[in-house]
Image (cartoon, rainbow, N blue to C red):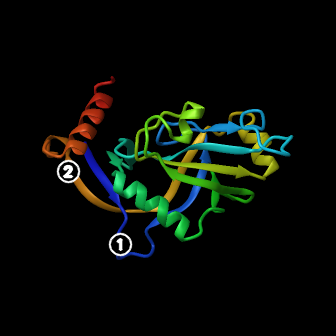
């Protein structure tokens, strides 16, 4: 099975994150948490804040994909995750959102975006979101009543999933992946565990 690293092409203005989708089954397999006013106290706030917090991209996490008859894994390096998060903000895409990658929706806005840099002191740790260093985290404000009431509160959506355009950097069978590169070796081990059902 092939392993493909997705990258951002510096020479292509079309690459980057176009939207963040709220979905039931996020490809990165990490759910967000819904923040309410009783979880974070702010002055003069007495109703639900309607903020979702979760991982948008996790570095070196193997993501299974199937395209017609081909099965493969994709992953993003720490460098690409960081670059994607910056480009997303630079292009002003904070208000671009979809539901299950199908329907464009309004009233969802990314209000916080950061890369986890510390295992202990990161804001995400306060909410038991123990993602690896290099993960791109976002907090999204939900002003859309239908999405909040019919999808978030009912648990129909559980996480974020990015939509964007990337280039392929590496495509090789797992047997030929260089073990000299520590990240590549770690990724290979993760994928091998998945293939072996661990």
Marks 1 and 2: in contact by CB < 8 Å?
no
- Does the rendering let one see residue 100? no
Q: Which residue is the site of mark 1? A: 10
> Which residue is drawn at the image coordinates 35% and 72% (left, top)?
10
Q: Which residue is the site of mark 2? A: 172
Residue 148 position, x and y percent, is 76, 44
Indicate which disc residue 134 carries.
none
> Which residue is drawn at the image coordinates 14% and 46% (left, top)?
178
Other residues around mark 2 within 10 Å, as few (<14) / some (14–19) / many (≥20): few
Q: Quadrant of the C terminus?
A: top left
Residue 6 position, x and y percent, is 34, 57
Residue 87 position, x and y percent, is 48, 66
- In the image, which is nearer the foreground, mark 2 or mark 1? 1
Disc 2 versus disc 1: distance between alpha carbons? Answer: 23 Å
> Which residue is drawn at the image coordinates 64% and 57% (left, top)?
97
> Which residue is drawn at the image coordinates 41% and 39% (left, top)?
132
Q: Is residue 98 toward the left or the right of residue 25 in the image?
A: right
Q: Is residue 162 toward the left or the right of residue 192 in the image?
A: right
Secondary structure category for the residue under label 1: loop
Q: Quadrant of the N terminus?
A: top left
* Residue 144 vertical position relative to residue 126 in the rendered view, above or below: below
Other residues around mark 1 within 10 Å, as few (<14) / some (14–19) / many (≥20): few
* Residue 30 vertical position relative to residue 172 in the rendered view, above or below: above
Earlier in the chain: of badge 2 and badge 1, it is: 1
In front: 139, or 1? 139
Q: Is residue 163 toward the left or the right of residue 144 in the image?
A: left
Secondary structure category for the residue under label 2: strand
In front: 142, or 194? 142
Q: Quadrant of residue 46?
A: top right
- Does the rendering let one see residue 196? yes
């Amino acid at each position: 099975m092939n392993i493909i690293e997705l990258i951002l092409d510096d020479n292509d203005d079309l690459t980057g994150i176009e939207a963040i989708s709220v979905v039931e089954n996020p490809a990165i397999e990490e759910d967000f948490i819904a923040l309410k006013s009783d979880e974070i106290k702010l002055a003069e706030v007495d109703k639900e804040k309607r903020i979702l917090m979760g991982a948008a991209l996790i570095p070196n996490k193997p993501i299974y994909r199937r395209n017609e008859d081909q099965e493969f894994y994709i992953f993003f390096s720490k460098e690409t995750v960081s670059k994607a998060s910056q480009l997303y903000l630079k292009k002003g895409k904070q208000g671009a959102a979809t539901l299950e990658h199908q329907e464009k929706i309004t009233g969802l806005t990314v209000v916080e975006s950061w890369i986890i840099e510390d295992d202990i002191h990161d804001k995400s740790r306060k909410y038991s979101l123990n993602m690896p260093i290099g993960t791109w985290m976002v907090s999204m404000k939900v002003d859309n009543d239908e999405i909040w009431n019919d999808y978030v509160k009912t648990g129909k959506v559980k996480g974020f999933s990015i939509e964007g355009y990337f280039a392929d950097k590496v495509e090789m069978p797992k047997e030929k992946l260089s073990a000299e590169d520590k990240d590549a070796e770690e990724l290979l081990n993760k994928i091998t565990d998945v293939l072996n059902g661990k």
